[in-house]
Image: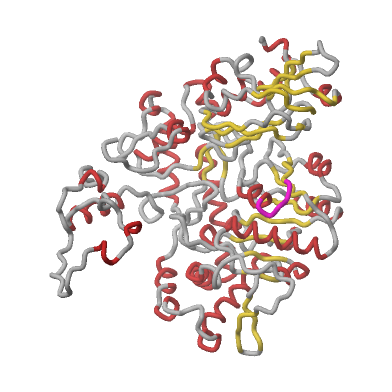
Amino acid sequence: MTPDKLLFSETHEWVHLDQTEAQPIATIGITAFAIEALTDLVYMQLPKVGDQLTAGEPFGEIESVKAVSDLYSPVSGEVIEVNSKLPDNLEILNDDPYGEGWMIKVKVTDPAPLSKLMKLEAYEKQCSEEQ
Amino acid sequence: MRNPRATRLLFELSKPGRRAAQLPASDVPDVPLEELLPASAVADRPLPLPELAEPDVVRHFVNLSTQNMSVDTHTYPLGSCTMKYNPKRNERLASLPAMLNLHPYQPDDSLQGMLQLLWELQEMLAEIGGLDAVSLQPAAGAHGEMTALFVAAAWFRDQGMQRTKVLIPDSAHGTNPASAAMAGFECVTVKSTPQGYVDMADLIAKLDEKTAVFMITNPNTLGMFDRQVREIADRVHDVGGLIYLDGANMNAILGITRPGDFGADMMHYNPHKTFSGPHGGGGPGAGPIAVRKHLAPYLPAPVVVREGDRYRLDYDRPKSIGRVRSFFGNVGVLVRAYCYILTHGPDGLRRVAENAVLNANYLLSRVKHFLPVPQGDRCMHEFVASAQKLKTERGITAMDIAKRLLDYGFHAPTVYFPAIVRESMMIEPTETESKESLDALAETLFRITEEGEDLLHDAPHTTLVSRPDEVQAARQPILKWTAGA
C-alpha cells in the first residue's frame, strides 16, 4: 500500500478504507514517522477480534526503549482481524509500515469520525511542524 | 584504582570448597537430614551457591560500590529527580539511638518525643503547602498520589457523586495516570501548548460533571510555572472537581508560593527531592500528602493528634480510607525531612528555591546556544534542552551525549522525558551545585557536541559496562545467571 492512498490521524495512525462492502472495512497501522520517533520497539499489545473500538480511544499500546505509547483508534467499529504475528516480529513495522505492518482491520460502524482524518499532504505538513 | 577481576560475578569467582568462615566442630550428635525432615522437604542436591574466601567477597563488593555515581561523588543534574546534596547532619540526627531504637508498638506515653516530631512535621507540611491536614503514611510520591486519589474517591462517594474521570496533562509524570488507574479512575489526557503549558481550550473541552480530579505538576516537567493555574483551578472547581498538585517540583517554589494558595485541594511531597530524604536506591521513601479541610476525615488512619501537651495516634476516624502503610510509614525519612525543614527555617527554605531556580537559569543561559531549549530563555528549577538539531545534522542523539557525560565524570541528565520534546535532555542542577561545577558541566556539554560522531555513538568508554543492548534487554531480558550459559 502506498501512503497517498491512506488517511491519517493526528496521533500518527494510518487508515486504509475498503468501501466495497456496505459497511466499510478500515485497515489500521502507524506511520513511518511515528515508528522513527518511537525508536527501537520492544513490545506491542493489540486488541482481540470482536472488541468494539471508539474513535479517539486507545486500541492497544506500543513500547519502545524510550516510552510506552497508546495506539488510538481513528475509527469506531468492531475488530474483525488482528495481525497476530506483528507483536513477535516488530521489525516488520520498520520494514513495511504501510503493508505487512498493518495492525488491525475494523468493520466501521460510525462513519462520522472518518471526516476528521487527513490526506497525506496535510499529515506531512503536521509532521514537518513537529520536527 | 578499579579491579575488573573482582567485579566478575560471584558465581564466576567461585571455587569448590573455598570458605570465608570456619565453623567449630559440632558438639551434638549428627543426625542424617532424612531422619529429621520428610523426603519431600529435602533437596536432591545442594544449592549451587558460590564458594569464596572473605577477601574475594570484600573486593567484589567494594569494587562494585566504586562503580556507583552518587550526589556524594559527582554532579548529578538528573532532571525531575532533584538530586540535591543531602546534609550529613540529617543522617546523623536520624541515626540517634533515641530515634532509631523506638518500636512502633511502644505505648504512646513512651513515644511522646517522636509523636511530637511527627505532629510538628504534619503542621509544617500543611503550612508549606497552604493546606489544612497531612498524612505522613504513604511510602513514596506515587503512593501519595494514589492515596490522595482514594481520599478524593471516598469524598465524592460520600457526597453521592459519581465521578469517573481524572484529567492529566500530556507532560505529566507517568505515575499520575498509573495512580489514577490504580484508584479506579479513567484517565483523560489534556494537551500542552508548544510552550509547555496546559492547553486551556483542550482542558475546558474535557471538563464535565464526570471530572473528579485534575492532576497538575506546577512547575511542570518542562520546568515552567504555569501561570494559568489559578484559572485552571477555578474552571475545575466550577464543574465540582478537585485539583491535585504533584509536588515533585516543590523545590522550585518553597516559601515563594503555596499550592493551597493557587487552588490545589490535595498534594504530595517527595521528601527525597525537597527535604533531603535518601535519593533512589529503591527506598525507603516517603510521600506525605496534604489536603484541604473537607478532605481531612478521609485521610489514612492513624494521624498524630495533640491534646494539650500530649500527643497520640488517633485511630478513631470513621470516614478514613484506612491504612496505606504498616505502622507509621518510613519514619526515618520523615525525621530527615523534619531536620531539614527546621535547619533551614522559613527564610532558608525560600533561599533553597531561589538558588535552585537561579542555578537552573544560569546553566540554561550557558547551554541554550548549542543545545536549544524550545520552551525559551527562562525556567524554574530545571529546563528541557533538545538535541534534535544535532540529531538531524550529525546523527548525534540525546542518548549519545548522556552516555559521553559519564566519561567526563558527570551523571547524565534525564533523557527522552518529557516525551513532548524531541531528543529531550532534562537538566536540573539543584541549589547545592557551585558556580564552578555549573561552569564545568556547561563546558563539558559544549565540548561533547564538538566531538566526533563515532566517539559519541560508542560512549561511554571508561565505565565497566559501556552500552547495554537496550532492545535485547527489553525484548529478551536475561534475569539470572545460569551455569554454562
Please name the residue shown 46% across and 55% down the image: B282
Residues in magenta, as a range? B182-186
Q: Position of residue B323 (x, y in %)?
A: 62, 68
B4 left or right, relative to A60: left
Please name the residue shown 64% across and 45% down the image: B172
Asked which quadrant contains residue B341, the reply is: bottom right
Say if B177 sits above or below B26 in the image: above
Q: Is residue B218 visible?
A: no
Asked which quadrant contains residue B439, the reply is: top left
B484 left or right, relative to A69: left
Residue in the foreground of this view, choosing between B87 and B315: B315
Q: Main secondary structure of the magenta part?
A: loop
Asked which quadrant contains residue B191, the reply is: top right
Which residue occupies the extreme left position in the image? B25
Say if B285 sits above or below B444 in the image: below
Q: Quadrant of the C terminus of chain B?
A: top left
Say if A114 sits above or below B97 in the image: above
Q: Position of residue B108 (x, y in %)?
A: 55, 85
Q: Position of residue B478 (x, y in %)?
A: 39, 38
Residue in the foreground of this view, choosing between A98 and B49: B49
- Residue B185: within the magenta? yes
Q: Is residue A86 visible?
A: yes
B422 left or right, relative to A117: left
The coloring applied to the image is secondary structure
Q: Position of residue B220 (x, y in %)?
A: 64, 48
